[in-house]
């Protein structure tokens, strides 16, 4: 992110990122707030019960690790500590999201590129995930204006397996997975 | 046995209003009438008399819709019993109601007790509301929330900051939220609770008052739309309850989004991270990232 290479994206990607961010952080928020509700009701706090309660939570390890290191504190201190942990996480994510927003130039596509769309219709991707096709078309649109555009993606299910078809039919120089990308 | 139209209810209302307001003055507020009717109805039911009063629990306690009374009473309620915003006895009460003497006596006697308890006493409206909550509030949460609304609305709290007055009530609310009955609203409520506390932590003065008030109305409106679905009686048309269910279902995501927007603004513009549990914060962020990778 700190490199001087221009970073470009599209409004579709921005909207999807914002949705994913809200969804993922929303899940963690829900889990921590539910844990607070549960701790508030339990008297006294039993770590075994909370292990069971958080069993299916993504953030289970973090919640339990926090509880284990705060077991000597009273209930209200534990609850306030969890509230701070959640708020710190959310605020950090918001700061990151806003920083990325400032670093990236977002383009709006104004052409349908029907010929490329048809290729992905035959390929089946339009049926599987239409938003992914929209993103490929957005990238192609930008690629016509920016020389040697690399398409960096974290979508290993739909986009990375279609690397060749994308390279062959769009203006993009290459498709690189987020894990393999080093600026 | 209740007839259609409901003469038993008509007699009960006429008798109550005649006792409480013999001179037909504009003194009884709608809200007070509803609460009196709720108490009367409860006490009559205990004696085996069901007047089939239509009503439901809403924002400020037991509520009766005038339209529902119009549907079940022999005469239009708003034409015969209302003087602007006040409830008054009808000008020409019915002479014959076709009600058994035994039932009539039970009704009159219960009304006389109600009159002794509340009639002509200063602040009787609040006393009736308190009693109605005491006896019939569906959940403790409802009663505590009334206390919460009272403090939120106070413009002057003396030397005590609002945060110090509201936080203990928020703690009580958190212990009493009926999460089994309102599981669909629970996550929204928890986010409301934490965001309200955030607001108390980060804002002060007029800005704090306005946002706390906005938040209070937001949750209470939605919760009340849910509570009337579970706690209602003698609603004249089943379609009404179906409409309530649709309204409540569509209200929850809107309310949640609204709270989320307020929360994000507060966190972006006013919050300073504590840097207390930095390692755990990073682990949580990693979890959020991994969720996207897993989903893909």
Image (tube, rainbow, N blue to C red):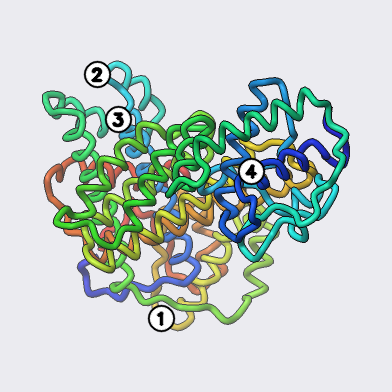
Q: Secondary structure at mark 2?
A: loop
* Residue located at (48% from left, 50% from top): B220
* Residue located at (16% from left, 53% from top): B160
Both on one chain, marks 4 and 3? Answer: no
Q: In the displayed structure, does residue A158 sit left or right of residue A40?
A: right
The residue closer to the viewer here, A16 or B89, is B89
Above or below, B29 relative to B37: below
Both on one chain, marks 3 and 2? Answer: yes
Answer with mark 2 or mark 1, whichever residue precedes in sequence: 2
Residue wearing tag 4: B19
Residue wearing tag 3: A40
The residue closer to the viewer here, A121 or B171, is B171
The residue closer to the viewer here, A64 or B263, is B263
Q: CA distance from mark 3 to mark 1?
A: 55 Å
Residue wearing tag 2: A44
Residue A42 in the image: x percent, y percent?
30, 22
Both on one chain, marks 2 and 1? Answer: yes
Q: Secondary structure at mark 4?
A: helix
Locate the N terminus of chain A and report the quarter of the image it occupies.
bottom left
Whether residue B226 is visible, yes or no, is no
Chain bearing tag 4 is B
Q: Quadrant of residue B107?
A: top right
Residue wearing tag 1: A146
* Residue located at (43% from left, 32% from top): B140
Residue A182 in the image: x percent, y percent?
26, 59
């Amino acid at each position: 992110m700190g490199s001087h290479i221009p970073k470009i994206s599209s409004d579709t990607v921005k909207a999807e990122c914002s949705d994913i961010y809200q969804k993922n952080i929303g899940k963690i928020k829900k889990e921590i707030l539910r844990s607070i509700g549960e701790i508030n009701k339990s008297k006294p706090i039993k770590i075994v019960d909370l292990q069971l309660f958080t069993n299916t939570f993504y953030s289970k390890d973090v919640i339990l690790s926090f509880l284990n290191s705060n077991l000597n504190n009273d209930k209200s201190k534990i609850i306030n500590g969890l509230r701070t942990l959640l708020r710190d996480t959310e605020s950090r994510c918001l700061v990151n999201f806003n920083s990325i927003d400032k670093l990236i130039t977002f383009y709006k596509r104004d052409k349908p590129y029907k010929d490329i769309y048809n290729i992905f219709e035959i390929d089946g991707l339009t049926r599987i995930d239409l938003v992914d096709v929209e993103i490929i078309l957005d990238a192609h649109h930008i690629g016509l204006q920016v020389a040697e555009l690399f398409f960096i993606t974290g979508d290993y299910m739909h986009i990375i397996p279609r690397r060749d078809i994308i390279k062959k039919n769009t203006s993009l120089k290459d498709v690189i997975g987020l894990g393999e990308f080093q600026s | 046995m209740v007839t259609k139209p409901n003469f038993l209810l008509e007699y009960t209302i006429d008798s109550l209003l005649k006792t409480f307001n013999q001179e037909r003055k504009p003194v009884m507020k709608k809200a007070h009438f509803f609460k009196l009717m709720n108490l009367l109805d409860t006490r009559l039911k205990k004696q085996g008399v069901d007047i089939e009063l239509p009503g439901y629990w809403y924002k400020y306690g037991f509520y009766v819709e005038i339209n529902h009374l119009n549907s079940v009473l022999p005469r239009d309620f708003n034409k015969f019993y209302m003087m602007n915003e006040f409830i008054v006895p009808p000008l020409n009460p019915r002479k014959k109601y076709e009600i058994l003497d035994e039932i009539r006596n039970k009704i009159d006697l219960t009304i006389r007790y109600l009159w002794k308890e509340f009639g002509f006493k200063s602040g009787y409206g609040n006393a009736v509301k308190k009693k109605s909550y005491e006896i019939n509030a569906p959940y403790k949460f409802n009663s505590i929330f009334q206390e919460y609304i009272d403090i939120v609305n106070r413009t002057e709290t003396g030397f005590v900051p609002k945060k110090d007055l509201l936080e203990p009530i928020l703690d009580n609310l958190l212990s009493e939220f009926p999460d089994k009955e309102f599981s669909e609203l629970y996550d929204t409520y928890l986010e409301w609770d934490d965001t309200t506390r955030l607001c108390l932590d980060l804002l002060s003065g007029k800005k704090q008052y306005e946002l706390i008030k906005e938040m209070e109305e937001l949750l209470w409106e939605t919760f009340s739309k849910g509570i009337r679905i579970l706690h209602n009686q003698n609603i004249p048309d089943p379609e009404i309850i179906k409409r309530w269910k649709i309204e409540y279902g569509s209200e929850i995501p809107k309310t949640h989004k609204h709270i989320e927007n307020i929360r994000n603004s507060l966190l972006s513009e006013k919050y300073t991270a504590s840097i207390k549990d930095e390692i755990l914060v990073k682990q949580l962020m990693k979890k959020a990232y991994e969720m996207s990778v897993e989903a893909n």
